Amino acid sequence: MKQVSLLILVLFSMFSCSKSENLSVNPGQKKRPEAEQFGFKFNDFNVLHDTIQSGDTFGSIIENQNLGDKQVYDIIEKVKDSFNVRSIRIGKPFTLLRSKDRHKKLQVLVYQPDRGSYYVVDFRDSITAYKKIRPVRIKQRTIAGVLDGSLSDALNKQGVDAALANKLTKVYAWSIDFFKLKKGDKFGVTFTERYIDDTIYDGVDSLKAAFFDYKGKLIYAFPFAQNQNSGKLDYYDDQGKALKNFFLKSPLKFVNITSRFSKNRFHPVQQIWKAHKGTDYAAPSGTPIMTTASGIVEQTGYTAGNGNFVKVKHDRTYSTQYLHMSKILVRRGQRVTQGSIIGKVGSTGLATGPHVCYRFWKNGVQVDALRLKLPNSQPMDKKNLPRFMAQIQPLKRELDSVANL
């Protein structure tokens, strides 16, 4: 019985050895590919990756390597026309390619100032230096989503750079109050992204088209240059109406309305009933206040009721005023552009807490800014409408295909 067991064990061992030998010499087995980057095969070198540290210089990095009879000063002189060695910055990566023998002699240094380019200093034979620009490929994609929080969160779930959220909020700043978007509201976006060497993601390149389901209506946005020579883009809806209004919807990026325009409101400080000819937006003290349209600063100053304030004249018809500032950042007569920071939120004057009271004049009369139908800037020229409609047709078709997802 023992002899039979021994025979089985020997046969099993022979079969196992034969199987492992067959696997090890399999002619179809693929070799591990050689790593190649910056135009060099890393398997040919002893490779050292590092980053520029505080106190590092080009000279201090290479003088610690085996350079033979080459002097650091002579090397810097030879490469200065192609590579400014003083331009290296802390935190930027560099790679040293050294010989694989025991001497580990420095052959090549590669410095990467950004993801899109790199410098090569070649120490082999005569010393040379050159700059390489990595090829960038633009890829387009369309996504759709449903809000369950902020727009940034919704985009992040789909692996989209946060820069796209900023682009969208700027484009729709005149048409959508993003703080009134609700859970379940839909959106769709067609945009392009940059890829370096076809693999390294380099962020959002441009916004091609978008829609938001806002208050039961799809609001589209398409970039279009009315003057093809200038290339200046404005955004229009699917009917060719400009999205950009003459005025921003509010003087703050983060909107929290605490009191509206009213003919009769109980004043929280004076404890009397009186007209409130403005809209109050609460925000932490120090929050930047923006002018809602371009114009000239007509007044700055302080009164017991208004506290620190700024008044901006936009044209012959419209003016706006911003009250209770903690700090005024503009001067009388200064020209400001839409979105310029003109002051900081405070609680100066008759105020129970930090906020800005936003007042709006039309033809010299204070009116409710939230109820005004304000004019659009740069309306679509009728002669450009056919070109615009032809341009947006494929983009709108793509967006509509994801609108009901």
Image: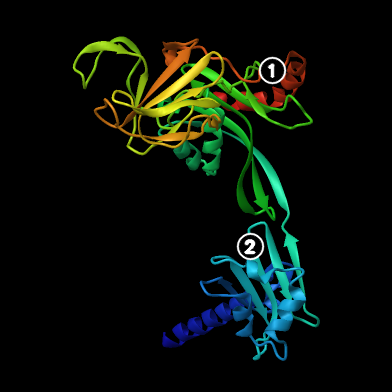
Residue in view at x 74 percent, y 77 percent:
77
Q: Position of residue 303 (x, y in %)?
A: 32, 25
Check disc 2 and report the residue beneath it: 113
Tell me the element at label 2.
strand
Residue in view at x 45 percent, y 39 percent:
153
Q: CA distance from mark 2 to mark 1?
A: 43 Å
Point out which mark residue 380 bears. Answer: 1
Determine the image quadrant of residue 109: bottom right
Q: Amino acid at mark 2?
A: Pro
**Whether residue 309 is visible:** no
Q: Residues within 10 Å of mark 1 (few under 14, many from 20)?
A: some
Residue 140 is left or right of residue 175, and the answer is right
Residue 390 is left or right of residue 149, and the answer is right
**Whether residue 230 is visible:** yes
Vertical relation: 39 (above or below) 210: below
Residue in view at x 54 percent, y 67 percent:
90
Between residues 330 and 292, which one lies in front from this camera angle? Answer: 330
Vertical relation: 52 (above or below) 184: below
Tell me the element at label 1.
loop
Q: Amino acid at mark 1?
A: Met
Between residues 327 and 277, which one lies in front from this camera angle? Answer: 327
Q: Position of residue 280 (x, y in %)?
A: 34, 23
Sooner in the amino-acid sequence: mark 2 or mark 1: 2
Q: Position of residue 103 (x, y in %)?
A: 66, 90
